[in-house]
Amino acid sequence: MDNELSALVTIFTEFYYWMTVVLMFLIHVGFCMYEVGVSRHKNHLHTLMKNTMLIPLVTVTWFFFGWWIYWAFVNGPFIGTSIMDGNSGLQLGGGFGANEFADPLDPLMGINLGDHISGVFWAAFLLFSWTAASIVSGAVIERIRISAFGILAIAIGSVFWSIDASWGWHFDGWMVKILGYHDAYASGVIHAVCGGFALGVLAVLGPRIGKFASDGTPRNIGPRNPWLVTLGLFLIYTGFWGFYAACNIPIYDLGPEYGMEGVTYFTATNIYVTPTTLSGITMNFLMSLSGGLLAGYLISKGDPFWTYSSGLAGIITSSAGNDLYHPLQAMIIAAIGVYVAYKMHFWVERRFKIDDAVGAVAVHGYAGVVGLVICGFVLWGYPSSGYEGYAAINPIGMIIGAIIMFGVLGFLPGWIIAKILHSMGKLRIPHEVELAGMDFNYMEASKADETALAADEK
Amino acid sequence: MATVTSWTETLTAGETVIYPFVGTEWLWLLIAVVFWLVWHFKTSAGETEEHNELASKGKGPSDYKNNIADW
């Protein structure tokens, strides 16, 4: 920062990401309220603690290795070739794009007067990691062991989402270069992968006691507190603003970046360093929210739970291309995603006896997959990058990308890890505890205190 | 010994790393990883113990309603 302009740009960018982190914290507040609102009285506190403790677990592992993975695996390894240094293996050092500064032992992973960006960028990605784990958290409430969930949270939050982001949400990622994968606001790299992961875990974990009648008919359990659910989802919407902002580089000169001699072109860009505007994505965010709400209200016949969730699913569906869509396209695409996600949720529930307590697989997983596929058609032919040699956005690349996100990096690892935990007897709480409620001891102690206090007061 | 003893000297020298005990990051990482692993084992064991104790009470699905406090 040797002149006022570069200082201003640097400090503005630092503050910009810092603000996105604060805003995204609301997503987690929302998820906690939402999950507690859906759970039954006898499980409230354990449900809350499960989601709360993923914060430190994912944070420390993101510091240990999650951030390192993001920068190390952009080439697969051995699938693509880095545009930075021509390397096809792990990116372990040598210039921007390499991951030496993500090494937890590196002086850049701390307060460093020569670097105002890495820390807030690390934090913005970390907040995505919390969201990733939190998406899975809601699906498995009221019967998973907290210790098992902690391991699953680390797996999705600090390993598998980090790998998929490295592959498909990085300007040097092999999926972008070879497949023409485009996922500006993370329909796939956060939502599809987490929905798939949650489904893999649910397939092993099984439904809550009583969720299905003896003839296999599903029963509705809750939500117990619709007001907490409402507030929670509003906070998730709010935090999603921060998420959208965090997915951008707020100010960047594309002229020299793209090798355009003598050209200065300052703009906001997405994660792939292709231009967009905060103004335009704001319209798209609101229009996709509206398309989702409208479709959800229509298809669920005004069910509040599904209408609110559909607002979220609408944004998620349009997110892959919301850096380029027209607002009306964003709205219609959102509505289509909600329709598919809603129908798929109940079909999978009935057909495979999957008890997804909050509809996470539908809202994040199915909507995310639909968003990726639609994006491949609507943005067919757009360049996936401003750099030379990248494949254009295309339907086949996006469909393969959706399979990688939902299936390969989502469902499969979730299923395998859950199977391992299950075989060790560490996945699910005992039958008797599920019947009594995980909070039984807390509640019993609280009641005893109340009784004792009342006796003293007489 | 403090990494920074004079801000003017640090800034004019172009020093950028200012946290204490520079060069001992590996030790802090080691302590953090051990703490993290111990935390997992201890909490998992504690959870099992809590579940076994609660399961032995043999409570039914509605028994918790007797324990709803009216604070």
Image (cartoon, coloured by chain):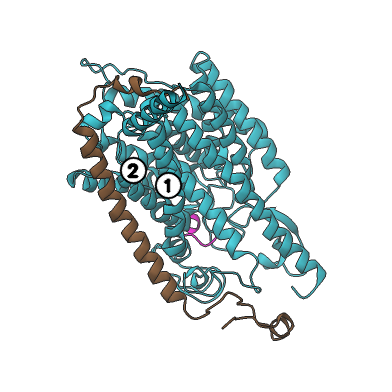
Chain colours: A cyan, B brown
Q: What's under tag 2, amino acid-wise?
A: Ile
Amino acid type, mark 1: Met
The disc placed on residue A146 is 2
- Identify the residue at image location x=36%, y=27%: A42
- Position of the N terminus of chain A by quadrant: bottom right
Q: Pinpoint residue A423: horizontal percent, then vertical percent.
A: 17, 45
Q: Position of residue B57 (x, y in %)?
A: 21, 30
Name the residue tied to disc 1: A53
- Element carrying mark 2: helix
- Position of residue A216 relative to residue A17, above or below, is above
Please tell me which residue is depicted at 63% across the width and 70% down the height of the picture: A115
Chain to which mark 1 belongs: A
> In the depicted view, which residue is nearer to us: B62 or A217?
B62
The answer to whether residue B63 is left or right of residue A128 is left
Part of the protein shown in magenta: A171-177
What residue is shown at x 47% (from left), y 75% (from top)? B25
**Relative to residue A398, is residue A334 drawn left or right?**
right
Residue A56 seen by the camera? yes
Residue A77 percent location from the top left of the image: 39, 65
Vertical side of B16 occupied by A179: above or below: above
Above or below, A258 relative to A335: below
Q: Position of residue A174 (x, y in %)?
A: 46, 59
